[in-house]
Image (cartoon, helix red, strand yellow):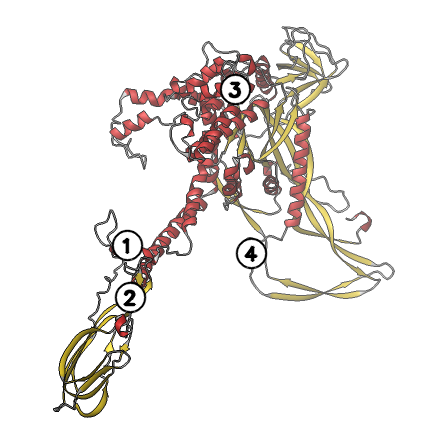
């Protein structure tokens, strides 16, 4: 038996049949088209946006009244400010109280508050807080309107207000409602076709040529490792050929996304494009959104096909090389004596049938949140702090600080305090050495005179003579004519012609003796001239002092420093520096190790975990925005209860025992916002939330420099970290449209506030359109299964059937492929019944198919008229509505050969 999906064999002389598509080898890529509705901003509503804005201002006691005084000076009526009323100021003053969020006014209180009034209040608050920053910078106390936190905290208060006003402006000026068309690109192999000419060998009549065919037993084929992460299922790793169209299309979508200078799109759906219209209209194949989606998809697949051709056998990830070279020679002969011959070689191209299906419609709700990656930047901030601590060693201790004095507040000499600080062993200040002196007997000279020079005085290095005293005693030779004389050379001291005597002390360094040898250093020689001396003894004693290097301005005070003191300070400073350097390098090594570990913790994370973390941050930001920045995911009262129950808070371990150790009041606090959190998680298809990440300059300017320098090996994580703000398109789950509009626009006010009627109408229309046109379609990211997906069946009718509660026969162009018991969608969602203003499109069940041009439906709830313009009759398929179909081509590794081909029809 022949497989109907396989191409038929080629029989010579018979034209080959068209190859059948390999439906079992279909590839699918999820896609979506976001349609932003353009509607006038409502005068009321947007309660959650307004409430979140006020909470984000983080008002402090007295600020509301101060803003009121600033906008409306004392003695002037309310009409001067116009927008900020006393009632609004009183309402905002309630948020100055330090109370649990549950005791603050509910979001419903802001339903009727005008957005311009809130914006005017925020602008005035920024100006008020900025003035306080300026007063603190000038050395004031901030005007007594703060909590005494200082300049840094005051600047943070300004930043909070700036971010809040920006978010309010972004969220309030655009219509939050939109539509998300869930789509799917299906790519199916549809055979092979001859491609470009590779080579040609011409042969003249009867020509014979030798063709050298060099064959290498070298096999080289390029493979690319692909990681496909599905946050809701598993992470799968596979290997596919680079010429695979589905993978090339996904790569092209990611490539285009990275080079989008406006915004980067992230979310559960890999391919997103946008469209805009003024209001809700039909989303069939003739709609503007379908046209935009088709253009986007065809451009994407064509670029992917071209990308596959360019990249074919260029990027090599896996190469297998075996064997050696083998060469053979073949002969080609043209047997004709009159006709030339040509052998042509062609490439083979793989043909793909590409279809774009639309299988669901969801209502969306837009929010803009500031700094979506703020929580993930914390580790990068820690890494930046560590890296800023790395650098060359610098020892800033001045030499003058090294002293043996006991400074105020210390109990030991300061140099010892420094030694303990740096962990060094240092010497004590040097003790003064013994002063040089000598006492000796001089040789007698009974005939004539002689000069006596004893051994020199050794003045220690770094010292000088401060005072030098001389003593001597001598007698003369017998006889009155033999008197002795004594003279110190270099001084005016001269004792002449004496019989005997003892002299001294005489201070030779004094001015009386010409300051002899005052401040002398090193080896000091003293020479004596003596005549007729006998029994002579000489004694010299000195006082020494440190050689000063810095004199005190007051000459009566000792010098500020000396050579000895400077050398000691230098030795101590070097020891302290060496010890400090050792400590520094130890700390540097520890910091480098911590930085490397933190860098690995940041970078060595699998793709699935990165995407999950980003999704968690987006969800956290949305909850913060909806419930206010003061919303506590874990209230302090419960944390206190956990501490009392001895729960390991740091590691999150404590609930593994048989009892929890918590009372009912603690659990009541935890469940304070349980209903809201449950509603937000159930009403939103978080797996289909679309996030538009905007550039860093949408953050506060003070953080621009840090954000610009953020780097991460994962391109998507880097974009997420560097985003200044994010537009989050919340996809509302099917069946929750009206509930979400009531929640987001009306808040929690009791009795409930009726939102803008236009918003509720659109919510109902979107839900009804999805029910009619996509019955039985999975709500999000439909998975492949063994069940064969059916195509939709479409026809038109020029009949004009009337409304009837009984079965109605409708004449159609063709009833082929319609099924009895199937549901059909009749007419267009754009047609409105003038009688009641409602859409005429409806769904009914086929009860009979009498012939090829008639369908019988169970009933008709509305009349339809196709006499002027035929109306549509659609039997939805499980694949969804087919929007467009086209073909693409990618290269294959095959070649084709032909003798004497028609080159006129060859590319």
Q: CB under 8 Å between callouts 2 and 3?
A: no
Q: Is residue 376 above or below residue 100?
A: below
**Left or right of 798: which side holds 239?**
left
Residue 868 is left or right of residue 657, and the answer is right
Spatial separation of the CA atoms under disc 3 and disc 4: 74 Å
In front: mark 1 or mark 2?
2
Label number found at residue 319: 4
Mark nearer the N terminus (1 vs 4)? 4
- Image quarter in which the N terminus is found: top right
Label 1 crowd bin: few (<14), some (14–19), many (20+), radius 10 Å: some
What residue sits right under mark 1 in the picture? 418
Write the residue at 73% across / 50% down: 196
Is residue 142 or residue 763 the one in the foreground?
142
Q: Earlier in the sequence, mark 2 or mark 3?
A: 3
Which callout, 1 or 4, points to the residue nearer the camera?
1
Instruction: Find disc 2 in the rendering and name its residue.
Output: 564
- Helix, strand or loop at mark 2: helix
Residue 20 seen from this side: no
For disc 3, the marked residue is 71
Q: Earlier in the sequence, mark 2 or mark 4?
A: 4
Picture mark count: 4
Q: Are marks 2 and 4 in contact (CB under 8 Å)?
A: no
The local secondary structure at tag 4 comes to loop
Q: State yes or no: discs 3 and 4 in contact (Cβ < 8 Å).
A: no
Q: Position of residue 73 (x, y in %)?
A: 51, 17
Q: Spatial distance from mark 2 to mark 3, Cα to Cα?
A: 72 Å
């Amino acid at each position: 038996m022949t497989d109907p999906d396989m191409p038929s064999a080629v029989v010579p002389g018979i034209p080959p049949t068209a190859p059948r598509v390999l439906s079992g080898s279909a590839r699918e890529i999820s896609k979506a088209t976001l349609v932003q509705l353009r509607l006038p901003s409502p005068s009321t509503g947007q309660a959650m946006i307004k409430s979140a804005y006020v909470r984000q201002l983080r008002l402090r006691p007295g600020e509301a009244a101060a803003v009121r005084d600033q906008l409306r000076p004392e003695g002037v009526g309310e009409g001067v400010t116009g927008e900020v009323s006393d009632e609004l100021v009183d309402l905002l003053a309630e948020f100055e109280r330090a109370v649990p969020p549950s005791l603050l006014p509910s979001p419903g209180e802001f339903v009727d508050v005008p957005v311009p009034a809130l914006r005017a209040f925020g602008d005035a608050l920024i100006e008020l807080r900025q003035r306080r920053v300026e007063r603190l910078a000038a050395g004031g106390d901030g005007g007594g309107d703060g909590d005494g936190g200082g300049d840094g905290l005051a600047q943070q208060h300004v930043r909070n207000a700036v971010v809040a006003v920006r978010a309010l402006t972004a969220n309030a000026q655009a219509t939050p409602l939109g539509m998300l068309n869930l789509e799917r690109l299906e790519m199916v192999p549809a055979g092979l076709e001859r491609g470009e000419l590779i080579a040609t060998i011409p042969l003249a009549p009867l020509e014979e040529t030798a063709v050298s065919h060099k064959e290498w037993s070298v096999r080289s084929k390029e493979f690319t490792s692909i990681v496909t992460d599905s946050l809701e299922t598993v992470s799968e790793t596979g290997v596919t050929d680079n010429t695979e169209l589905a993978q090339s299309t996904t790569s092209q979508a990611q490539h285009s996304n990275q080079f989008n200078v406006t915004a980067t799109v992230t979310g559960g759906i890999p391919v997103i494009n946008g469209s805009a219209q003024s209001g809700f209209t039909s989303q069939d194949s003739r709609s503007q959104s379908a046209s935009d989606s088709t253009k986007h998809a065809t451009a994407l697949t064509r670029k992917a096909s071209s990308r596959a051709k360019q990249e074919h056998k260029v990027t090599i990830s896996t190469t297998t090389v075996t064997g050696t070279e083998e060469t053979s020679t073949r002969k080609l002969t043209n047997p004709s004596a009159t006709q030339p011959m040509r052998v042509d070689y062609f490439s083979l191209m793989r043909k793909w049938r590409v279809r774009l299906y639309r299988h669901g419609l969801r209502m969306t709700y837009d929010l803009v949140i500031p700094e979506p990656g703020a929580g993930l930047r914390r580790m990068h901030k820690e890494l930046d702090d560590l890296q800023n601590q790395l650098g060359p060693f610098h020892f800033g201790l001045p030499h003058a600080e090294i002293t043996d004095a006991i400074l105020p507040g210390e109990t030991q000499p300061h140099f010892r305090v420094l030694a303990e600080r740096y962990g060094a062993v240092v010497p004590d200040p040097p003790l003064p050495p013994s002063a040089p002196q000598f006492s000796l007997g001089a040789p007698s000279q009974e005939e004539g005179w002689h000069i006596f020079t004893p051994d020199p005085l050794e003045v220690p290095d770094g010292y000088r003579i401060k005072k030098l005293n001389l003593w001597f005693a001598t007698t003369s030779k017998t006889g009155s004519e033999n008197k002795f004389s004594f003279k110190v050379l270099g001084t005016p001291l001269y004792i002449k012609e004496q019989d005997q005597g003892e002299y001294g002390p005489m201070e030779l360094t004094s001015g009386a003796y010409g300051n002899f040898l005052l401040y002398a250093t090193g080896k000091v020689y003293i020479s004596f001239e003596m005549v007729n001396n006998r029994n002579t003894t000489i004694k010299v004693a000195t006082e020494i002092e440190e050689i000063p290097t810095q004199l005190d301005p007051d000459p009566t005070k000792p010098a500020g420093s000396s050579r000895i003191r400077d050398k000691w300070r230098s030795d101590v400073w070097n020891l302290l520096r060496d010890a400090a350097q050792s400590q520094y390098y130890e700390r540097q090594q520890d910091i480098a190790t911590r930085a490397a570990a933190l860098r690995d913790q940041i970078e060595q994370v699998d793709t699935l975990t990165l995407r999950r973390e980003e999704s968690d941050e987006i969800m956290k930001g949305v909850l913060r925005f909806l419930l206010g920045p003061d919303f506590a995911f874990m209230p302090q009262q419960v944390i206190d209860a956990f501490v009392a129950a001895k729960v390991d808070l740091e590691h999150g371990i404590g609930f593994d025992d048989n009892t929890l150790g918590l009372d009912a009041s603690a659990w009541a606090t935890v469940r304070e916002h349980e209903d809201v959190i449950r509603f937000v998680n159930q009403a939103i298809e978080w797996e289909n939330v679309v996030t538009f990440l905007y550039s860093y300059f949408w953050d506060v300017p003070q953080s621009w420099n840090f954000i610009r320098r953020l780097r991460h090996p994962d391109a998507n994580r880097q974009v997420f970290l560097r985003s200044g703000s994010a537009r989050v398109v919340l996809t509302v789950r099917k069946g929750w449209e009206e509930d979400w509009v009531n929640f987001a626009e009306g808040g929690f006010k009791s009795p409930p506030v009726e939102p803008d009627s236009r918003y509720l109408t659109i919510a109902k229309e979107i839900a009804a359109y999805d029910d009619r046109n996509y019955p039985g379609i999975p709500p999000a990211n439909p998975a492949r299964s063994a069940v064969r997906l059916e195509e939709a069946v479409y026809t038109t009718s020029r009949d004009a059937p009337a409304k009837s509660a009984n079965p109605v026969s409708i004449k159609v162009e063709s009833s082929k492929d319609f099924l009895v018991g199937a549901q059909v969608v009749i007419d267009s969602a754009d047609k409105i019944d003038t009688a009641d203003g409602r859409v005429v499109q409806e769904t009914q069940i086929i009860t009979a198919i009498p012939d090829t041009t008639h369908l019988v439906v169970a009933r008709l709830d509305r009349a339809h008229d196709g006499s002027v313009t035929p109306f549509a009759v659609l039997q939805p398929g499980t694949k969804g509505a087919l929007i467009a179909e086209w073909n693409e081509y990618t290269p294959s590794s095959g070649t084709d050969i032909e003798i004497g081909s028609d080159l006129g029809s060859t590319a």
